[in-house]
Amino acid sequence: MKQDLYEQVIIYIIENQDKFYRLAYSYVRDQEEALDAVQNAVCKALEHYDELRNGAAVKTWFYRIVVNESLSILREHRKTVQTGGELQEEETYVEKGFEPPDEDLYEQINRLEMETQEIIKLRFYEELSLREIAEVMEMNVSTVKTKLYRGLKTLKLSIQEVDV
């Protein structure tokens, strides 16, 4: 049984690696850090696959790991910037094929509260269902719905302000 689960996890990771990279990249906005986040997530998943109780939950379980690793890299980067002595201008790298379709919209999403950003990205960029998002975010489905619709309303208002 455990060997079957291990193989299921490996197959899922291999088949969806582009999605995981895109998700990590949407958080860290850096090619190398996104690759690091996915690599760390794969390592953690393979080390802890036996903790997965339900083989049907591989998708949401692994998305949660990727999100946590991406957020961990962001927290680490924030500590480095705050404690670093000399701040240097860093050139932004844009990954071809993984940039959001509308950069202005994406920037508006990134101005929202972090949890709301995560929910919107998982819903519209990763096309997860509300139930799957609730599992990934470890929230109640109704909380996810509330945060999603409140975030979309805020997003709509901020986009209308930009257009005016």
Image (tube, rainbow, N blue to C red):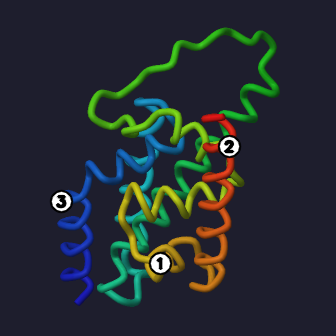
Residue 72, disc = none
Quarter location, residue 142:
bottom right
Front residue (pair 145, 73) = 145
Tell me the crowding category of disc 2: few under 14, some 14 to 19, or many 20 or more residues within 10 angstroms, Cα based: few
Residue identifier under label 3? 15
- Amino acid type, mark 3: Glu
- Amino acid type, mark 1: Leu
The residue lying at 48 percent from left, 62 percent from top is: 65
**Residue 51 in the image: above or below residue 89:** below
The mark that comes first in sequence, 3 or 2, is 3
Residue 130, disc = 1
**Secondary structure category for the residue under label 2:** loop
**Secondary structure category for the residue under label 3:** helix
Residue identifier under label 2? 111
Q: Position of residue 157 (x, y in %)?
A: 67, 51
The residue lying at 47 percent from left, 30 percent from top is: 30
Q: Is residue 82 left or right of residue 144?
A: right
The mark that comes first in sequence, 2 or 1, is 2
Tell me the crowding category of disc 1: few under 14, some 14 to 19, or many 20 or more residues within 10 angstroms, Cα based: some
Between the residue at mark 3 and the residue at mark 2, the CA separation in whole angstroms equals 32 Å
The mark that comes first in sequence, 1 or 3, is 3
The residue lying at 59 percent from left, 68 percent from top is: 148
**Image depth: mark 3 or mark 2 in front:** 2
